[in-house]
Amino acid sequence: MVTSHPVQYQAPLFQKLARHPQIDLTVYYESDFSLQGERDPGFGVPVKWDRPLLEGYRSKFLKNGIGMSSGGRSLGSLAIIPEFWHEQYDAVFIHSYATLLSLMAYVGAWLSQTPVLLHTESELIRLRGPLTQAIKRLFLGVLFRGTAGFQAIGLPNRAFYRYYGVPESRIYHTPYSVDNEFFTSEGAKWIAQREQLKVGLGFAPNVPIILFSGKLIPRKRPMDLLRAYAGVVEEGVAAGLLFIGEGELRPVLEQFAREQGLTQVKIAGFQNQTQLPRYYAVGDVFVLPSEFDPWGLVVNEAMLFSIPVIVSDRVGAGPDLVQDNETGYTYPVGDVMRLRALLKQLVLNTDLRQRMGEAAQERIMHWNYDTCVTEIVRAVAEVAQ
């Protein structure tokens, strides 16, 4: 495995892979910044994940020419090339194709004649200009011819591969997943305290709560949600709105809520992964209104708590996970009035929320690390031959 830095969503998958009897796993990282509690540019606060990211599998941090951790710089990227030559792996799993590290990993794999499996979040949701498309087609044509297998995280990702000429036989279904076992076990504890949690956050115990989880940045469009919620409240509908996250738009959201007299809007700030279940436990509706999200793993998390979800049509998880009137709704990005109508419908209809929430949880349980491990093992076996 080659990836930029330890990530809270990848570590459980790596641990499961390392336990598989047919896999001898080594994960190469370029940087350790996610372990040091450095300031996250999106959240705007220091972030140090509170779950173990290196336990349960073998990992190596690439070093630069003077023996120091590269911190994501080019000298560390070059160190991956001799690693493949010396170790002679059966296959290499490369995350992304758009970084210097991933390109150097390709060079190392090709020189050592190691088959490459590619994992990327790329999709066709965003519109690209003709020149960009032409350049990508030329570049990816060369790169993909030197790639033995492709890991598809969902339908938009699979469509991306097919668009650039990858045959279906070389695509492996590895659904973009979170640690279902962790969230469901933690959720069971906190859902039992749902009413107390609501009161502790400043909500009435019987008021439906709308959730948002993520960075409070323009790309996520949290103001769309706040405006839609304000419209619902203006119609006399009782509901609360909880933002879980931090970012540059926090003061903007807070000012709007004050000016509109929206006393049932709360911003919990950044919450580490072990803290998230207690916030999801109070939710009745989850919304991700992003201008663009290649996937949006917060959708997975919310669905594990039996919460129906509303996403914009620019959220990559939508085509796979959000089935209209079954697990949630998809609406045109930026259409605040449509979002407002969907919120009102779900907030006012308890039975509908319950039915859709149960369907959401049932669907997301099939998106898990075990499926990923099975497909990765199959892919390695096939490309190694």
Image (cartoon, grey):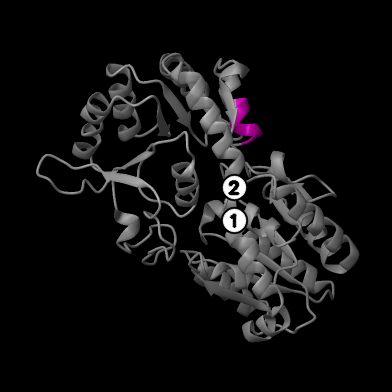
Local crowd size for mark 1, using a 10 Å CA cut-off: few (<14), some (14–19), many (≥20)? many
Is residue 28 one of those drawn in magenta? no
Residue at image coords 55%, 59%: 214
Give the residue pinned by disc 1.
Answer: 221
State which region is magenta. 154-159
Q: Is the residue under label 2 in contact with that under label 1 (CB below 8 Å)?
A: yes
Question: From where the camera sits, is residue 290 visible?
Answer: yes
Residue 159 to residue 235: above or below: above
Position of residue 296 in the picture relative to residue 115 (left or right): right
Left/right of residue 180 with respect to residue 41 in the rendered view: right
Prevalent SS, magenta region: helix
In the rendered image, which quarter is residue 344 located in? bottom right
Q: State the image coordinates of residue 151 (x, y, percent, origin top left).
A: 54, 30
Expressed as whole percent of the image width and height from the top left, the position of residue 33 reads 30, 55
Query: Residue 40 appears in which quarter of the rendering?
Result: bottom left
Q: Residues within 10 Å of mark 2 (few under 14, many from 20)?
A: some
Locate the N terminus by quadrant.
top left
Q: Secondary structure at mark 2?
A: loop
**How many angstroms separate mark 1 from mark 2 (CA)?**
6 Å
Amino acid tagged 2: Glu
- Residue located at (42% from left, 31% from top): 93
Q: How many marks?
A: 2
Give me the disc on residue 291.
Answer: 2
User: Which of 135/297 is in front?
Assistant: 297
Q: Is residue 280 visible?
A: no
| Residue 172: x %, y % from top left | 58, 27
